[in-house]
Image (cartoon, rainbow, N blue to C red):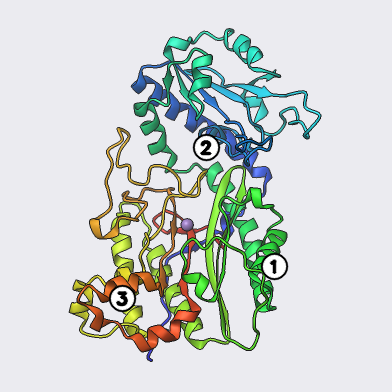
Amino acid sequence: MQHHHNNVTLSLSRATTMLTPLASLSILYPKHLQGLASIAEKAMSYQKCDSILIHSGAPKLSFLDDYHHPYKANPHFTWWLPITQSPHCYLLIQTGQKPVLFYHLADDFWHVPPQPPQGFWCDYFDIHLCADLAQVKRGLRQYQSTNENRAWIGEDIELAKELGILQANPEGLMHQLHYARAVKSQYELACLTQANVAAFAGHQGAKQAFMAGKSELDTQLAYLCAAQQDTLQMPYRNIVAFGHHSAILHYQHYDHSPQNMNQPQSFLIDAGASFNGYAADVTRCHSRGSVLYKELTQAMTQAQAKICAMAKPGVSFVDLHLQMHHLVLDILMDFSLVQGSKDELITSHISSAFFPHGLGHLLGLQVHDIGGWQQDELGTMLSPPKQHGFLRCTKTLEQNMVITIEPGLYIIDSLLEKWKKSGFAHLLNTTTIDHLRPLGGVRIEDNIVVAQTPVKLSL
Ligand SMILES: [Mn+2]
């Protein structure tokens, strides 16, 4: 097999200059808040409302149980405030007024009660401490804006009604806000950077554990230990996949059987971390004893880096996805996983059988940040091309959007079986495919800030 190992010169800057000390968050925050205020005012004037009440959310009970599902804060709430673990809070946003926080301080001897609010953000809010809904209702009456002209942002619509608010998550308002959320403030970039610092530590710990022969479960535990975050702080369930498991896109188990150190082994880890509600989402591949997997990982890493360097303002994410398919096809040919003329390989869309998911997505307060298909503030949606239905982002990139770039190449038998029935079976080289199968697949994922010189947040 002949592989390309030519060094690509990348105009991709490292995030090191952005590794802001935590103290600088307090310096960046006021400007972030100013930005949010003008976004909210514009959205309110569009919606013809004069205030928004944002609910933090609340944990949900398990069926027939007195145990709650893990609490996940409303991202619209954490957009304003770095409060991720205090449910039952309300945030009142009014045109031209200081934002008001109704902070839930319950008398609860079962749990560690939320602490009275403290931190760099406190000065920017009127804070009311509330033990129950009645106190929130009383508190709301002190403000000029009224329920008729108030919009609610939150999951619990019954609660909105109970508070007398009829406009729950109005579409026009939500479109405005979701469109704006794609472009990050400097404060948000600093939070995303910090999330990536924790994720990097985790990835290093996991790599060590894998190399030492630990199981998937022990490798996951090593990740958490090194990242110093617990499972509930993970923005999604980490994928820790050895061997053929790495070809299962959302592999959801942690096998506890130890590795056979006499066999070549591959390892795909898609694992993140969080900071102030912001998520890191990073995938790396490692291997022991397999030249094939190592070279495939190198080839995919180089191709992925080329695409990362193209994440500039004005570029269509769909184009990046399609360009990546060309690079995947080149790799498939280099590694003799496919055969036949390039023209026929292109027409057959064979790269989709090996790279069946999207190139990436918006990243922020949600791992898959909302609004990936949204083209304007009014909510015009653009679906991905028919062949590429799983693409989560069809936007034209703008300065300071944050995206993931995560191409993959896998041996997925169910897809190859379908392929064989398509009339293009002769394009597959089953010998090499059989060779790669036990090693699963490769995915490389980084977090990129869109800019003239794109910035890589993942380390
Ligand atoms: Mn991702």
| Residue occupying image coordinates x 32% and y 61% | 320
**Residue designated by label 1:** 218
Count the numbered circles shown.
3
| Residue occupying image coordinates x 78% and y 34% | 112
Q: Nearer the viewer, residue 156 or 207?
A: 156
**Residue designated by label 3:** 329
**Residue designated by label 2:** 75
Separation of marks 3 and 1 at Cα, in angstroms? 35 Å
Separation of marks 3 and 2 at Cα, in angstroms? 38 Å
Vertical comparison of 397 with 442: above or below: above
Vertical comparison of 208 with 175: above or below: below
Q: Are marks 1 and 2 in contact (CB under 8 Å)?
A: no
The answer to whether residue 209 is seen in the rendering is: yes
Q: Position of residue 76 (x, y in %)?
A: 51, 33
| For marks 3 and 1 on the same chain, the one whose residue lies earlier in the sequence | 1
| For marks 3 and 2 on the same chain, the one whose residue lies earlier in the sequence | 2
Task: Work out which quarter of the rendered image holds the C terminus and state it.
Answer: bottom right
Q: Is residue 356 rendered to the left or right of residue 289?
A: left
